[in-house]
Image (spheres, rainbow, N blue to C red):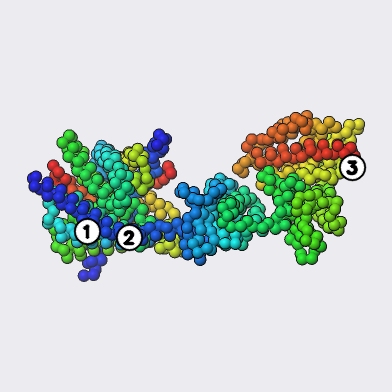
Amino acid sequence: MKDNKFRAAIAKNPVLALFLGACPAMALTTGLIPALGIGCAALLVLVLSAAVMSLLGKAIPEKARVPACILVVAGFVSIVQLFMNAFLPAVYGMMGIYLAAAAVNLLFFGAAEESCGAGFGAALGRSFMTGLSFVLALAVMGAIREVFGSASIAGVALPFLENYKIPFLTQSAGGFVVFAILIAVINCFDRGERQAQPGFAAAAAGLVDAAPAGEGE
Amino acid sequence: MEFKEIMLIILAGVLFNNFALERFLGVTPLLGSRGGAGKAARMGLAVTIVMLVTAALAWPLQTLVLDKLNLGYLQLLAFVAVVLAVVYLAELIVNRAMHGSLGVYFPIIALNSAVLGLAVDNAAEGYGFWASMAAALGAGLGFMLALVLFSGVQSRIDEKYVHRAFRGLPVSLLAASIMSMVLVAFK
Amino acid sequence: MKKDNFKSALALILIFAVFALILAGVNVFTAPIIESNGSAQELAPLLSVMPEAKGFETLYDVNASGSTLAEVPETVQGIYAETSGLGYALRLSTTQGYTGEPIELTMAVDAEGKISGIELTAYPDSKDFGAEYPGSFLGQDSAMAEVGLVAGVTYSSKAFKDAVSDGFAALIANGLVGAGVKSDAQLLLEQLPAVFPGMVNAEGVAQYEERELAGGEFTYIQQVMKAANGCGFAYVAADGDKSYLAVCNAQGACRVYDAEGADVTGSVNPSLLEEVTADAAANQEVFAEREMSRLGKLVAEGAELTALPLDNVFSTVTGAYLIKDGGTEYYGFSARALGYSNLPMICYFVLDGNGAIVAMTAEEFILMGDYFTDYELDEAQYKAGFAGLTADTWTGEQALISGATVSSNAVADAATDVFDAFKTVTENGGEGQ
């Protein structure tokens, strides 16, 4: 059982396998702390949005579903923002624009949309696992980029690595690279089970089909 | 605002602060888009238009409502509502006018971090109206640039054999990283 | 259809409204916390220099209006009064440093007007003045008697010191603290640029090396300062409770001044004068041989040189000579002006009987271009440019080279001093005094 869940966390990892939430994954993993910050915030938002949408989903007409999901996610993100700003101002400062951008991020939207009308428990469980996998992936990326990019971990300097650090890793281009390598590694593990495809393609395809029903004629 | 400053903001949006390649906003559609330069340009155009309209609406919303009434905490929610409304209306209008050639992109745009990111950014920088529009233009053009360039790179990649592990996303990401490095040179 | 549309719109509006309400509620709860976080951040640098502070009241903020304080210098960014009477904290920013980018600092002044805390918060210049320098300000009052500048980083450390001065000035002008008392030594040293211009560089800052004195070495002398360019010495000496400033030029002629700036060479305790003269004589580098050789060559081989006294000359001129070549008489001078990086530019000038420059040269044209680039100087042309200039036609600009202003300024200063020396020497009849 555990093995299955673990494999799912990797093989179906939202970030690494499905490319959801790529934006914060690359932007906020320059260090372990911002990675954990957005990770935990994401977990909260995911679970809360899934819960709400599973309860309200049936009441909302088909057309309004997409915007409703987005609004709900945005609402929860706003709430989390306020709390983080109040109680963890340093971490909040590191979030930059990306916590706000999460409101329209496919990771959250996907979880909310999935939960529309799904069973409450199932929705909670699924979103929680997604969130956890997200945190995991980001923590790994954050740790790698921080340790090898700025010779520190969670802000604590690691002097013995000082001479070997590669600042490139903490830059934007470096983010792309680390991400690419991580995905490649996962792909190796996967043994052909599923190639990493932009998960959004599936969502967008769904979206595009749903467009006539979702946003107007 | 001086002309020079406006030009600088536009240039910044396209080059140094490129939303997709530098700040990772809207990177998902960037990497997922397939279909050649033409399609990429059209999508970029759609994004630019949405950004411009959103910025135009977001600015009065921010300065006249949110700031005046001290409702800063509603910013995200309000901006998201604006983006949704713009996208919905745009789709209505464009679909009627062009029979869906651009329309198919709009829902994706609603979920594009770049548009929302732009609105929040403008508010954070405290830009005036024209500066906001300039930023929207710059960001949109930058996104379009990234899309078009990337589609070219992507078609090249698709022609070659890529090792199984790197196939698909990873190699695209590496390509994106090179493009990002090029932009850093402009900083 | 229509019902569906209506229902959709309603649903969306409801969701928006509900969240808006929730947010408003959360905001009521979190807003005060966020605000105090923000002000804590602003106060952090102030608390850093005054950790025991209970709170601060803003008396002046450069970005806000409505302050009751007047005469606040430009460098002061903010003045804050500590609420329990511990004193004041100030934030300052100066652009007078080497690069012109802002150097920022925070300082705390206690109720007695002494610096109780000081911290450098932003420093853009390439050479830093060391972590101990700000520390040297602790306990100082507005006179800053014991704080000097850091050699090699004079611009930046002067900027720092001036900023601190401004901080004090603002506090004193508004009656918040009392002015500090300057020590006698400080008052005396303030006279130095006026009484011994030769020791001073282009910015008007005296450049010297202070010698460490062993206890009991001298009866009267308290401080010994050797001019950086070798032009002589300055001494702070005390006789009983009276303090004096004594200056000696390169030829050993000495003058003594009291705290009011009066020349008391004739009336001061002779032993004091003797001690000073003796020390100068013992430690002064003798340039005569080199000077005579160089000046002689400028005129002709086999010229005869006689040294002329420079009793009243305290400029950069260290040597004056009467040069006889056959039947013609010339006057030769050697001057050591402070140039780039405070290195002495040793120049030699030969003037004819009427005071017109006949020839000039320098030990080494250390003409470093501004900003560390080497400057290619056409020496022959440069030197030739001086020929024929007299005190009347001399404006100073003939020596200036754009792009190497600091160094060429030194040459200009040297020439000016030489013309003055010429006047002094010839007024005194030329030979002897």
Q: What type is the residue that disc 2 sits on?
A: Thr
Residue under numbered circle 3: C433
Question: Which class describes the residues within 10 Å of circle 3: few (<14), some (14-19), or many (20+)?
Answer: few
Spatial CA span between label 1 and label 2: 21 Å
Q: Which residue is drawn at the image coordinates 62% and 41% (left, top)? A: C370
The CA distance from mark 3 to mark 1 is 101 Å
Q: Which mark is residue A49?
A: 1
Q: What amino acid is at disc 1?
A: Ser
Q: Residue at x 52, y 58 (%)?
A: C89
User: Disc number at residue C30?
Assistant: 2
Classify C356 as above or below C240.
Answer: above
* Residue at the image point whose x is 23% and y is 56% from the top: C21
Left or right: residue B20 versus residue C249 is left
| Discs 1 and 2 share one subunit | no
Q: Nearer the viewer, mark 2 or mark 3?
A: 2
In percent of width and height, residue A42 lies at 28, 59
Q: Amino acid at mark 3?
A: Gln
Instruction: Write down the quadrant of residue A2 in the picture.
Output: bottom left
Identify the element where label 3 is drawn.
Answer: loop
